Image (cartoon, rainbow, N blue to C red):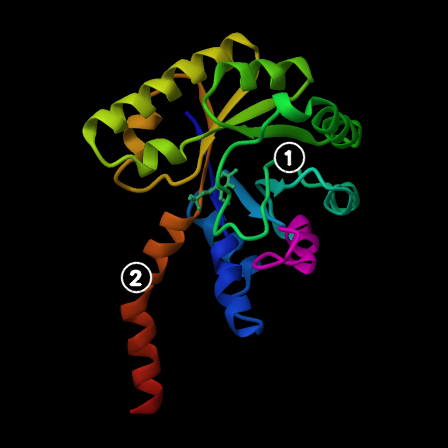
Amino acid sequence: MPGLGVNIDHVATIRQARQTVEPDPVWAAALAELGGADGITIHLREDRRHIIDRDVRLLKETVQVKLNLEMAAEEEIIGIALETLPDQCTLVPEKRQEITTEGGLDVLGQEDRIATACRKLQDAGMEVSLFVDPVAEQIAAAAALGADAVELHTGAYADAVSEEDTDREFAALVAAAESTREAGLVLHMGHGLTYRNVSRIAAIPGICEFNIGHSIIARAVLVGLERAVREMKALVG
Ligand code: PXP
């Protein structure tokens, strides 16, 4: 059975929108654990637009399941990972202007840089996963440089509109999942997965971990809103 890593970045996004203290991702992580999350995933971006350094430190203390830090292979962030020691680091590409992570890591185009980051993190006892597009050459490069796992980017599948495009992107993920298993890498999946599109992916054999964020947080806002309004109405009325 694959594990579910819950990405709580967008809880922090709401907090940062007001530069205040709520909602606290530390509370969100505890509730996600109560709901059965097998992991908590956070992305410490260079611009700190959602998760901030204090969250990483506190979550390392409080999270009892696997803590997965998504990060760019940049010196500053590698330093923070080496100080806080999450269980796993997922290396992702990062562009300042992007709304969310856009494409997979180009492992082939920067093998030395990724291999160096990978080794530093692994030497400190962390597992390293590389977030890649479902492309055989990228997976082979990840295996060659000694990554522990790859997370296959499911965004193109999730964003496909026509049945034809969806089927093509799904087939790419099935083939890439097979390449990952054959390369001896642990298989993760994530990005853009929702309550509607995840079941088809979950049927692919050999997946160890899903990382899902936006759809879960979006649903949480709506399923919790009615109660939140009732509670405020009781106070004002
Ligand atoms: N996996 C990776 C590597 C990501 O960068 C993200 C987004 O932060 C996710 C999974 C979660 O994506 P989503 O929020 O679309 O579920």
* Residue type marked 2: Leu
Q: Secondary structure at mark 2?
A: helix
Q: Quadrant of residue 183?
A: top right
| Mark 2 Cα-neighbour bin, 10 Å: few <14, some 14–19, many ≥20 | few
Residue stretch rendered in magenta on the structure = 45-61
In the image shown, does 39 or 7 lie closer to the viewer? 7
Q: Is residue 150 left or right of residue 233?
A: right
Disc 1 on helix, strand or loop?
Answer: strand
> Observer-nearest residue: 109 or 104?
109
Of residue 173 and residue 32, the one placed in the foreground of this image is 173
State the image coordinates of residue 126 (x, y, percent, origin top left): 71, 32
Q: Residue at x 67, y 56 (%)?
A: 58
The x and y percentages for residue 92 are 59, 37
Q: Amino acid at mark 1?
A: Gln
Q: Which mark is residue 222?
A: 2
C-alpha gap between disc 2 and disc 1 = 31 Å
Quadrant that contains the C terminus: bottom left
Q: Is the CB of the residue bearing disc 2 within 8 angstroms of ligand 1?
A: no
What residue is pinned by disc 1? 88
How many numbered marks have been drawn onto this rendered protein structure? 2
Residue drawn 75% across the image and 41% down it: 78
* The N terminus - image quarter: top left
Can residue 169 be seen from the camera position used here? yes
Residue 203 seen in this snapshot: no
- Is 172 displayed left or right of 17 in the figure? left
Which residue is painted at 66% across and 52% down in the image? 46
Residue 209 appears at what percent x and percent y?
48, 30
2 and 1 marks in contact (CB < 8 Å): no
Q: Is residue 66 magenta?
A: no
Residue 31 vertical position relative to residue 205 in the rendered view, above or below: below
Q: Earlier in the sequence, mark 2 or mark 1?
A: 1
